[in-house]
Amino acid sequence: MHLKSIFRLFPIFFLSFLLFPSISLGDQVFSRENSIVRAVRKISPAVVNISTSKLVERGVNPFFLQENDDFFNRFFRDFFEPRKRQYVKNSLGSGVIIDSAHKYILTNHHVIVRASKIAITLANQQEFEARVVGTDPESDLAVLKIETETELPSITMGRSNDLMIGETVIAIGNPFGLSHTVTTGVISALNRSVRTESGIYHNFIQIDASINPGNSGGPLLNINGELIGINTAIYSGAEGIGFAIPIDRAKGIVSDLINYGQVHTAWLGITVQDLNENLINYFHLPVKYGALITEILDGSPAKEKGLKRGDVITEIKKNKIKSSRDYYDHLSQHTANEIIHLVFFRNGIKQRISIKATPFPPDLALDLAFERLGFSVEELNRSLAIKYRLKDKEGLVIVAIKKGSQANSIGL
């Protein structure tokens, strides 16, 4: 290239440097700091590591024989009393600080169930012993509390009633003891029901990020760093599938656990049964599913709001009710004092109603148990032990039998 041509191009190069300056290191860092990074930075300090210890009893082979030796195992089991040995079993989980002022931590019930000691490790590695404020196996939620004067970070509560399939989510936890591990994914499905060994759980958020042991109890966040769910490792049937309890479901339960130590399940005061073809034709229903109201108790929330026998419930809070089991399962997901939105049919006409649920009346529970089971019980105490000449120190004692009941017929 001629020298004259180079001089002609120089102003162009100079102008390009002025208009398009090189990207600085700071600009590069800023361009990598996306919404996920900001959400994790915001919430991560409120995520805690939970380690539990529990005493477990196990039979010990007195002659140190191999456990798979069937012949000797049967022999010694028949002729020798097996020795029991206690040992400590440790497990790990996650939790999230939901109230920095009162030091409340939210986690899963299965993380802390039967634990004799619960240790909390904060993000700054401070350790505290926690006590259980309340726990609910039905929802798999538990609230813990630690005692400290230290100011704690807390999480920002979001909502789960407007979640979208495909929405980006962030999970933080301690899988396999690897503290503050961050995984991301998307919402795969909503209102998912999951069957486990412990029972059926409803209304779960399904995500495509695996929730591994140790992740349980940790937060599920939206892209804004708001808490939208509590991760739970209750299902290990497939990789790439995780579940979380929606935070709107958790809020009412947490309130009950803090105030009462247990959950007061929603009660409306109605009894329902499944629909069949004859009932569908009789009530002129435009739908082929629902739960038919067969009884309404006087003074119940449903009675006061005007529900009647013969009404057919087809939805509870936007969840379809296809059977009586659906009705009871979905109602059990809500707590007392919640507003329950129902869709029902009366005389073939679709209607909507909102009812404030109340706790199940304790006296009614005892009466129903006696009617359905055919017997009533009381907790064993000194006077009952003397009356019935019992050597046991704890348990339940049958104190009444209903004549003609199955309990009566089998000799209880």
Image (cartoon, helix red, strand yellow):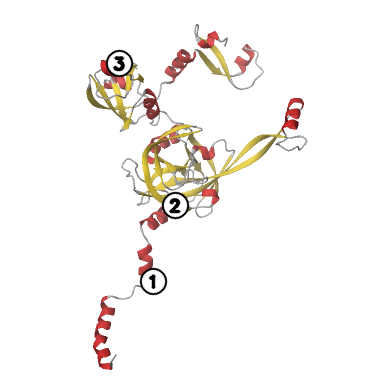
Decide: few, some or many residues near mark 1? Use Cα within 10 Å; few <14, some 14-19, many ≥20.
few
Where residue 202 sits in the image (x, y, percent)? 40, 34
Question: Disc 3 residue type?
Answer: Asn
Decide: few, some or many residues near mark 3? Use Cα within 10 Å; few <14, some 14-19, many ≥20.
few
Whole-Å distance between the Cαs marked 3 and 2?
Answer: 52 Å
Q: Residue at x 41, y 54 (%)?
A: 40
Q: Are circles 3 and 2 on residues that touch, CB within 8 Å?
A: no
Whole-Å distance between the Cαs marked 3 and 1?
Answer: 75 Å
Whole-Å distance between the Cαs marked 1 and 2?
Answer: 27 Å
Q: Which of marks 3 and 2 is nearer the N terminus?
A: 2
Disc on res. 183: 2
Which label lies toward us, 3 or 2? 3
Viewer-closest of 301 and 29? 29
Residue identifier under label 1:
25
Q: Residue at x 41, y 21 (%)?
A: 361
Q: In which quarter of the image is residue 191?
A: top left
Which label lies toward us, 1 or 2? 2
Decide: few, some or many residues near mark 2? Use Cα within 10 Å; few <14, some 14-19, many ≥20.
some
Secondary structure of residue under mark 1:
helix
Disc on res. 357: none
Which label lies toward us, 3 or 1? 3
Where residue 143 sits in the image (x, y, percent)? 47, 39
Where residue 406 sits in the image (x, y, percent)? 51, 11
Q: Is residue 182 above or below residue 233?
A: below
Question: Disc 2 residue type?
Answer: Thr
Residue identifier under label 3:
278
Q: Which of marks 3 and 1 is nearer the N terminus?
A: 1
Q: Earlier in the sequence, mark 1 or mark 2?
A: 1
Secondary structure of residue under mark 3:
helix
